[in-house]
Image (cartoon, rainbow, N blue to C red):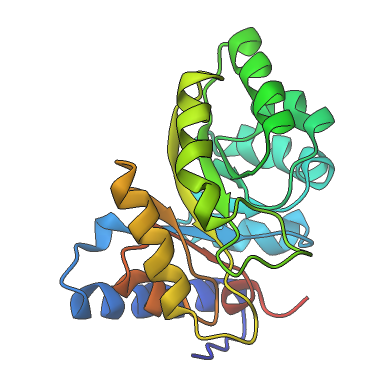
Amino acid sequence: MTLTSSSPASGLAAVETEIRRACKEARRERTSVNLIAVSKTFEADAIQPVIDAGQRMFGENRVQEAKGKWPALTEAQPAIALHLIGPLQSNKAKEAVALFDAIHSVDRPSLCDALAKEIAGQGKSPQLFVQINTGEEPQKAGIAPSEADDFLARCRDHWGLAITGLMCIPPVEEAVAPHFALTAKIAARNGLTQLSMGMSADFATAIQFGATHVRVGSAIFGHR
């Protein structure tokens, strides 16, 4: 699926139309899918028209980049929710917990240690998604599917982390459907209802497999 637009606002409108179509085909309510507008690498002047068009949920890949541009935007529009969708270094956990409403890349014990400490210390509880490396790609972060159940149990029992759901990024050259299905299966057997799946090229397919959060960047903002 390729969506092209002449402006971020028109891109947002086109993505919204496609989400509604996908929800209708899947016999789901539109309200069951959260659109995360991925604004990484874009400055405030590109983001503001999307805010003005009504979008309130945004995704960033890096803590430092988000710190530089979002405080002023969120001061003007307090209803904005920020989601960290990129890898998180343990030494950035303090800043991440302070800044983000959700973190989609929980993937290792050291990070869980750091997050548990900061959540307790700051009294702030961002939504936490465990990243599943469904393709078991060595260059990619995430928990192997075979280790997911044990890791999720440790998140709850050892670190006391309230995990919201799962996130996945399928391998680039593979069909996405089996990866979305696998992630949904792992979530279901662990009692998790939230699924962060699907990006600009495949979010409609992700919705068919139960995605509750779709991470859409280029279809809204254009290519970087």
Residue 52 appears in view: no
The residue that appears at 55% across and 76% down in the rendered structure is: 200
Task: Return the x and y of residue 187 as percentages of the image width and height.
Answer: 37, 50
The residue that appears at 73% across and 59% down in the rendered structure is: 40
Image mark count: 0
Q: Is residue 165 left or right of residue 69?
A: left
Classify the position of the C terminus by image quarter. bottom right
The residue that appears at 25% across and 72% down in the rendered structure is: 23
Residue 214 appears in view: yes
Task: Return the x and y of residue 2 as percentages of the image width and height.
Answer: 53, 91
Identify the residue at the far left of this view.
27
Of residues 35 and 150, the one drawn nearer to the viewer in this rendering = 150
Q: Is residue 104 left or right of residue 12?
A: right
Of residues 208 and 68, the one drawn nearer to the viewer in this rendering = 208
Task: Return the x and y of residue 11 as percentages of the image width and height.
Answer: 53, 77
Q: Is residue 167 above or below residue 15?
A: above
Task: Return the x and y of residue 149 as percentages of the image width and height.
Answer: 45, 43
In the picture, residue 117 is in which quadrant?
top right
Q: Is residue 99 left or right of residue 169?
A: right
Q: Is residue 158 above or below residue 186?
A: above
Q: Is residue 149 above or below residue 208?
A: above
Of residues 185 and 14, the one drawn nearer to the viewer in this rendering = 185
